[in-house]
Image (cartoon, rainbow, N blue to C red):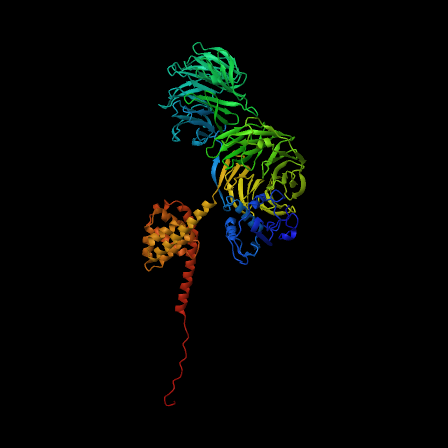
Amino acid sequence: MGVRWPGPAERAGPGPAGGCRNDGGLGRGRKELGCGGGRLHLGRKLPRAGGGLGLYPELASHRQQGVPEAGLSAGEPRRTALLPCLRTCCGSPLQPGVLCVVGTNTRLTALLIEEMTVRRAISNLLHPRRCLGTPQGYAVERKMEPFYKGGKVQLDQTGQHVFCVCGTKVNVLDVASGAVLRSLEQEDQEDITAFELSPDDQVLVTATRALLLAQWAWREGSITRLWKAIHTAPVATMAFDPTSTLLATGGCDGAVRVWDIVRHYGTHHFRGSPGVVHLVTFHPDPARLLLFSSAADATIRMWSLQDQSCLAVMTAHYSAVTSLTFSADGHTMLSSGRDKICVIWDLQSHQATRTVPVFESVEAAVLLPEEPVPKLGVKSKGLHFLTAGDQGLLRVWEAASGQCVYAQPQPPGPRQELTHCMLAQSAGLLLSVTTDHNLLLYEACSLQLQKQFAGYSEEVLDVRFLGPEDSHIVVASNSPSLKVFELQTMTCQILHGHTDIVLALDVFRKGRLFASCAKDQSICIWRMNKAGRVACVAQGSGHTHSVGTICCSRLKETFLVTGSQDCTVKLWPIPEALLSKGTAPDSGPVLLQAQATQRCHDKDINSVAVAPNDKLLATGSQDRTAKLWALPHCQLLGVFSGHRRGLWCVQFSPMDQVLATASADGTIKLWALQDFSCLKTFEGHDASVLKVVFVSCGTQLLSSGSDGLVKLWTIKNNECVKTLDAHEDKVWGLHCSRLDDRALTGASDSCVILWKDVTEEEQSEEQARREEEVVKKQELDNLLHEKRYLRALGLAISLDRPHTVLTVIQAIRRDPEACEKLGATVLRLRRDQKEALLRFCVTWNTNSRHCHEAQAVLGVLLRHEAPEELLAYPGMQASLEALLPYTERHFQRLSRTLQAATFLDFLWHNMKLPTLPTAPSVAPSAL
């Protein structure tokens, strides 16, 4: 049975086509809500199970279960249990003036009930957890910021902490939780150029572009010593000796300096290296007092601290030397370089004994312990080393034969170069870093991946909640790889499957299956198992340009829709093999085939959305229009025209026949699906609106824009309830949890923010604040009645209400002994209370009605407080500047009044009244 959309006569104020309706297109009229049999009549026919084009399929399944009867007796028109339930689920009482009566056929007739209110009540009856209240505000619950933006990374000897550079800070990362424990930043706030952690893990030294060296007690986060580096150019590298007492620094000025960090003085200054010294390291035997360095000439210099001279210049590399490492006995040294070779040196003869071609630019080489490690192909006790370079793989080499005995499997996706690698032998961990700023932690004996950390996401393009309980989030950034985080532990998984930047994400209804699309013209479907591990289960391609948007089916996991820069939309059915529980996770991705292809617009398609019933499709394009299509054959139903610029997002309402569109013209529009007219327009963003979603069961909108703002709108009154300002750049990603209690945003500032609905907390705090104010007001009245002025004045000041304090001052001045009591009360106040009272006087003094109280308080302070004490009050100068002009005005008014009174008195005393004529006396005889 199909849906009968309400006609124009049933809608209030149809208005011109494309116009804005203030009623939101929600008609008023007689509507009946049937209790028996689960039939609900809202001015249209609702779908039965499995049929129709209605937007509320959950009603069909609920109809089979039946709605409980209201328990009415025939002929008893009275309120039923359904009406209070309706009120409760709506989150607020029904609108005033609503008449609710019950007929003999157990049918509740509601007059003048808005459709949105009824639908919201129905949804709450079916899903009581979804609509517990209307959000009025969100607060930041967690902010995932970049903690590594390139440069050096170091792992402590225990394997518990990772130190990495992030601009002007050195961040200390906890390996177990993935949280940043501390951010160490010098006061000059200059970029960090080098840092080093001592071998005993106690001291950290940083160098900045300001040519300052700072010694940190990093566990406390404090600087213990700060001194000038004396280098004439920034320090490029540094290293500790094995005893953690000597520090060597190599600068861009070609100099190498050695510092005693215990006695706080410089011990050596070595010159002779041409160009930048980018590598320094001490010999592991502290008795030898040897220091090695390498500069731009690709040579290795060995310096003697004892003789203060260069003992040898070792030449074998033809490009920059990237690492130096030593054998356990200290007689052999391994060097690696970007010339694709590793050289083994005999430190006694200072000669190269073997050159091993590794066929990649090596960024780091690590000598492995001289013991068999079968999992890495090390079968003898000979010298073996591990390399990391531009091929993105960790490989193990045998020094004697020059053969590669182990190589990591090549991960899917584009090759990611490795920039750093280091071994924490005591912890049995190996740390490597990719060019995407991802930190990978391996078990040293097997190279099995233990932890992954995403240091820098660059520009976040899309974000989604994952899991049935929204326990994970997935992030798409300026990278071919996806990052999945578990919210409780912040464990990170880096997913490889695309070969170019991932542009958009979407999640299926159950939360374990999600899809991604990318610039490589392909789509991928990923599945998360119950353990939280994610794997690619399907791939598809067919578009001829970048796939910029994707949307999954809403009712069941049956299909997905993609939109591309080739102006086409494709519908991809989900193979049954993916949905069966018996599918093996390691069977490889299934190949997807497009079922339908439709050219929809003349320009790039930026957004696609599937209706809640999986029967309709909306598309938004750069051609400034949105279009409505019938699925599965993509038949055009209508066009939404009205935006002045391209559309970035389209979204169906979960409750109404309404489509929301977000445009580059800075507006959000709501459209009626029946006649394609504009119902409402929301203006508030200063730039393009990039995303919009419905929240609160379709009664509110959450939008994000290029201005870095996230706004919460109430649809009924077009009001922006809240503006969230936490991002510094375009907010591309926006998603809400299933219960609408949390929101997720991702922006170009590489930050991902998890927002929490704090409406209940704010309401509780406001209620508690009001109750406290009532109690204090009552207490204040009691104190004034008992003439306990000191406590009353202190309580009024604590409320921080100038008018309440003014009331207390006025009550004191009404007392017969006002002068003495006012002075005694004011002088017994604390200093902070006097400062607050002085601020209030500034406010009172601006009003001629209250200036007398202000002048009285000022008189007390000026007569009894020393000028030095008054000037010590914070903001005293500003207060005086505000008091002087109004005080002068008040005195001028008083002077004019006094002059007028004096003149009147003068006139009264100098008035000469004329003598009244006396009446003639009459003789008694005449009477």
Between 281 and 408, which is closer to the camera in this rendering?
A: 408
Q: Quadrant of residue 537?
A: top right
Between 49 and 588, which is closer to the camera in this rendering?
A: 49
Q: Position of residue 412 (x, y in %)?
A: 56, 25
Q: Residue furthest bottom?
A: 925
Between 602 and 203, which is closer to the camera in this rendering?
A: 602
Q: Position of residue 826 (x, y in %)?
A: 34, 52
In the picture, the quarter occupied by the C terminus is bottom left
Q: Residue furthest top?
A: 349
Total numbered circles: 0
Q: Residue at x 36, y 57 (%)?
A: 811
Q: Position of residue 135 (x, y in %)?
A: 50, 45
Q: Residue furthest front?
A: 74
Task: Specify whether residue 274 is in view.
Answer: no
Q: Quadrant of residue 382?
A: top left
Task: Specify whether residue 813 is in view.
Answer: yes
Q: Position of residue 418 (x, y in %)?
A: 51, 23
In this view, 124 is above or below 430: below
Please give left or right for residue 140 compared with residue 30 in the image.
Answer: left
In the picture, the quarter occupied by the N terminus is top right
In this view, 489 is above or below 137: above
In this view, 141 is above or below 72: above
